[in-house]
Image (cartoon, helix red, strand yellow):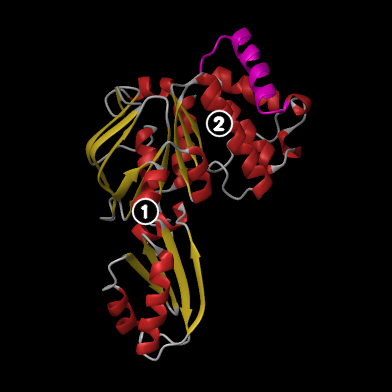
Amino acid sequence: MYAVETKSLSKIYGTGIKAVDEVSIQVNDGEIFGFLGPNGAGKSTTIMILTTLLKPTSGTAHVAGLDVVTQAKKVREKIGYVQQESTVDEYLTGRENLVLQGKLNHIQKDLAKKRADELLELVELSDRQNDSVITYSGGMRKRLDIAGGLLHRPKVLFLDEPTLGLDIQTRYKIWEYIKRIHKEFEMSIFLTTHYMEEADRLCDNISIIDYGKIKITGSPKSLKNALGNEVVVFEINSDTKLENLLSELKKISLVKDIKANGEEVTIFSSSGDQVMPKIFEVSANLGIKIETISLTRPTLDDVFLSYTGRELRDENGGYNRKKEREKMRKIRA
């Protein structure tokens, strides 16, 4: 049994937008799975379906072996969901927020208090547990959010952009907590993120989604290796002959893929040091001057770029996130 499994999952909104298009994914029990994609790619719509907040137009989705449509109530008992925006009550203390979560999840009072103690210690908030959340920093609120998502010991924890907007030091700290809870609770974690380093450090496997379709799935390491051993990035003095340059570079046997953005060209190759002299040769023949050039090993950012392109897009899924958050609160109650 998979922790999460979808088959040909699709969602078409009333506006006609197909936000999720025949998505099929399998998340193994006990793994950290990353779901990556640009804004508007379909990540949030997918996670809303998996957490029972939206119904799919077609296809199936199972979480912890349960159908998200026909067994929605049972699914909610098996999952934890930490949203992008903090859902804690800032006028309650950290402890009061967790105790409230216990009530909403119908956890016996004494057990809820015991788990609150454990979780406050886990996320290092014991010394601030009796302070109003309004005095907490953004990182502290996110840690409290994660603790709330763990209170009822879910089999599958959904983390939707868990470190969005946090500074790099806080982001690293959250990564430590995610690793710790994954190991300590032996749970499956479904993570959406914009940060490629985050996915690279945390995830066992990832899927990249764009325009509602899955582009590629695999481990971060295998995806980087498949892209090519090295990446060559160079800038030219003019893009007027860019098409001719790209056409000639594609003929080089060691070149696996090429991306261009204005006067900057990125080449994915199995042997960058052998390709670089050929780049200079081709450029010279076309009368193109290379301004700068660099050679690096591919990162997950390069994989992401290869499958989604460079452009940033606005969210266009067609649903109201605020409305869905309110719906989630009513369901929990």
Instruction: Residue 27: name its quadrant.
Output: top left
Instruction: Residue 179: name its quadrant.
Output: top right
What type is the residue that disc 2 sits on? Answer: Lys
Could you tell me how far apart the alpha carbons at marks 2 and 1 are, in whole angstroms? 26 Å
Asked which secondary structure carries label 2, the reply is helix
Q: Give neighbour class at mark 2: few <14, some 14-19, many 20+ (Cα, 10 Å).
A: some
Quadrant showing the N terminus: top left
Q: Is residue 228 above or below residue 289?
A: above
Instruction: Residue 170: name its quadrant.
Output: top right
- Residue 240 visible in the snapshot: no
Q: Dot 2 corresponds to which residue?
A: 179
Residue 175 locus on image (x, y percent) = 58, 38
Residue 100 locus on image (x, y percent) = 61, 22
Give the residues in magenta.
Answer: 105-125
Judge by depth and name the residue closer to the eye, 239 or 308: 239
Q: Dot 1 corresponds to which residue?
A: 41
- Residue 45 visible in the snapshot: yes
Pick whichever of labels 2 and 1 is earlier in the sequence. 1
Nearer the observer, disc 2 or disc 1?
2
Q: Residue at x 32, y 44 (%)?
A: 217
> Residue 178 in magenta?
no
> Residue 108 in magenta?
yes
Residue 10 locus on image (x, y percent) = 25, 44
Q: Is residue 218 above or below residue 295?
A: above
Judge by depth and name the residue closer to the eye, 293 or 125: 293
Q: Residue at x 65, y 17 (%)?
A: 118
